[in-house]
Amino acid sequence: MARRRRIYEGKAKVLFEGPEPGTLVQYFKDDATAFNNQKRGTITGKGVLNNRISEYLMLRLAEIGIPTHFVRRLNMREQLVREVEIIPIEVVVRNVAAGSLSKRFGVEEGTALPRSIIEYYYKNDQLGDPMVSEEHITAFGWATPQDLDDILNLSLRINDFLCGLLLGVGMKLVDFKLEFGRLWENEEMRIVLADEISPDNCRIWDAKTNEKMDKDRFRRDMGGVAEAYQEVARRLGILPEGGPGDVAGPKTMQ
Ligand code: TMP
């Protein structure tokens, strides 16, 4: 393969220069980190599964009119995406208490929240991604009030759609993290969904047993991490019994 210019290397992905201007190749690694890089490991096959899961979810979201950076999957570990200017905010949407929310407010994990809660974190590893308010975001100029309005609306629509999609195949969307970017087309700027949507940045529980099917299995040393990611892909209908491949949409659970 021809040498490509590496644009950025994150904890779980690498971004390379794409084949055409304005595109990037997003490569999914098997590396996993948690607690801002303090815990590190490898989950064999994770990159392949996240590439496939994120492709599927981004395509489904595009079908309902959510603009995304996703163009197409290139191979097992890579996808072509539009180059966007990443807004340095991590948007967390929560439906059920878990993780840092449970810790911060002393709410037992698994408690349904009275309504979905949106939180913003400033994307800065050196500072440990501190939680911020809309005031911080607009005052420091990370996003405008109009950007934030778009981000909030998109996040709520994404949450509604993904909750329904996952519940249809027996999974509960507890919470998840999104990133957005700015995309310019003919002097016009649009906010689009970027990064990835996978069990790395979602909490997904089995709807009946509440068994964890996401990166918490790695964060909490529970084992069976790759198997859990595989089960998410299987239920979404994108991992047929014979192995990874292309099949149509999810099969509803009985
Ligand atoms: P939290 O409960 O640790 O704040 O995490 C909320 C959600 O955000 C959870 O689904 C995991 C995801 N997340 C990331 O994707 N990246 C991060 O750096 C953190 C802290 C959480």
Image (cartoon, helix red, strand yellow):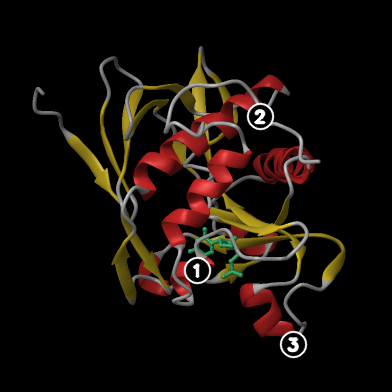
* Residue 210 seen in this snapshot: yes
Pointer 3 and pointer 2: residues touching (CB < 8 Å)? Answer: no
Q: Residue at x 33, y 31 (%)?
A: 76
Of 26 and 135, which appears nearest the observer?
26
The residue singled out by tag 3 in the image is 106
User: Across the whole image, how many numbered discs are drawn on residues?
Assistant: 3
- Measure how far apart labels 1 and 2 are at the Cα level: 26 Å
Q: Quadrant of the N terminus?
A: top left
57 vs 53, left or right, is right
Depth-wise, is mark 3 or mark 1 nearer the camera? 1
Q: Amino acid at mark 2?
A: Leu
- Measure how far apart labels 3 and 1 are at the Cα level: 21 Å
The residue singled out by tag 2 in the image is 61
- Residue 232, given in percent of the width and then of the height, sits at 57, 46
Depth-wise, is mark 1 or mark 2 nearer the camera? 1
The residue singled out by tag 1 in the image is 217
